[in-house]
Image (cartoon, rainbow, N blue to C red):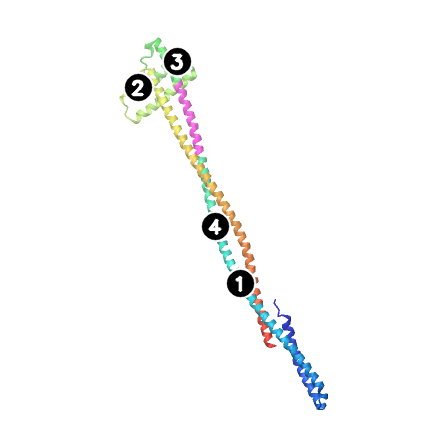
Amino acid sequence: SPRPPRQLRLCGAAMKVFEVAFVFGFCVAAAIGEQAPTSLETSSPLGKVLELMDSLAAKVTKEGEVEAKAYKEYFEWCDDTSKNANFAIATAAAQKEKLEAKIAQLTSAIEVSTAKIEDLAAAIAQAEAELKNATLIREKEAEDFAAGEQELMTAIDVISRAIGILEKEMAKNPAALAQVDSTNMASLVQALGTVLDAAAFPSSDQKKLIAFVQSKQGDQDEDLELSAPAAATYKTHSGGIVEVLEDMKEKAETELADMRKAEINTKHNYEMLKQSLEDQAAADTKDMDDEKAAKAASEEAKATAEGELEMTSKDLANSKAELETAHSTCMQVAADHEQT
């Protein structure tokens, strides 16, 4: 804590010494005056005392001037210290307020980034789940298409070869198959089996062909039950066996073409959906990475600001304590000066 200058302390003591010396000198002078004669020669002891007192008075006066100067300089120091402390307090208080506002702003930015990161993570997870589900559906569709395509291609091939064999047999014996009742499934299957056996058509292909004919005949029967049959529909059944097979082949080829067209559209739609989901997930991932970087930067800046705030708060407290101490000490010195 600040103390008054040494000159102030010494000069105060000198004043007390002067007071004592003055009283002592006065008493000595009085005693000598009572005993000594009135001549000039006998008055020299009193002169010595007066000379001593004059010297002491001059010394005390000089020290008083030094004390006054030191007192003035001390209180100039008090004023400077007070001004500097007040300036330091105002600066630290402003800096403290600024840092607190910055920390609050950074805290809000961190919270916003955290919320955005959570939303983006949820969006990415949802897109990945949708893509996974769409991929599973697409794989099942592709599998079904491959099986259906293979089945139709096999049927078309078997029908084509069967038609070729039947045409050869009809060339040899036109009347044998000209009027087969194609409306009777059992009759049709029996006729096909007889001709194909005679032509050494593979039994496995015969089974495929007969199964296909039966399945298509079943489909046609279901269609007839759902709507009134037209004359053209029955006309198809009234022709020869070759015509029936050619009609089935044509329908199989049409079905195959429609199936392939549907597969192309389905695959295209899946690819578009996949691309859209992947693009969105990539954009969300980039945004999430940016938000993570922004959050990290805010957290670092907040930590720095909190460290600066702690130091500023300590400086502010120290400046206030310094001002209080200087004020108390300077007031005490002023009181002591008044007393001396």
Residue at x-position 56% and y-position 63%: 319
**Identity of the amino acid at label 1?**
Phe
Residue at x-position 56% and y-position 62%: 317
How far apart marks 3 and 4 lie (CA) works out to 83 Å
Q: Secondary structure at mark 4?
A: helix
Which image quadrant is residue 180 in?
top left
Q: Who comes first in sequence, dot 2 or dot 4?
A: 4
**Identity of the amino acid at label 2?**
Thr
Which quarter of the rendered picture does the N terminus lie within?
Answer: bottom right
Which quarter of the rendered picture does the C terminus lie within?
Answer: bottom right
Percent position of residue 95, x then y: 52, 58
Q: Who comes first in sequence, dot 3 or dot 4?
A: 4
The dot on residue 87 is 1
Q: Residue at label 2?
A: 236
Horizontal relation, residue 229 to residue 66: left or right? left
Magenta-span inclusion, residue 191: no
Percent position of residue 284, x then y: 46, 41
**Identity of the amino acid at label 4?**
Ala
The dot on residue 196 is 3
How far apart marks 2 and 1 lie (CA) works out to 110 Å
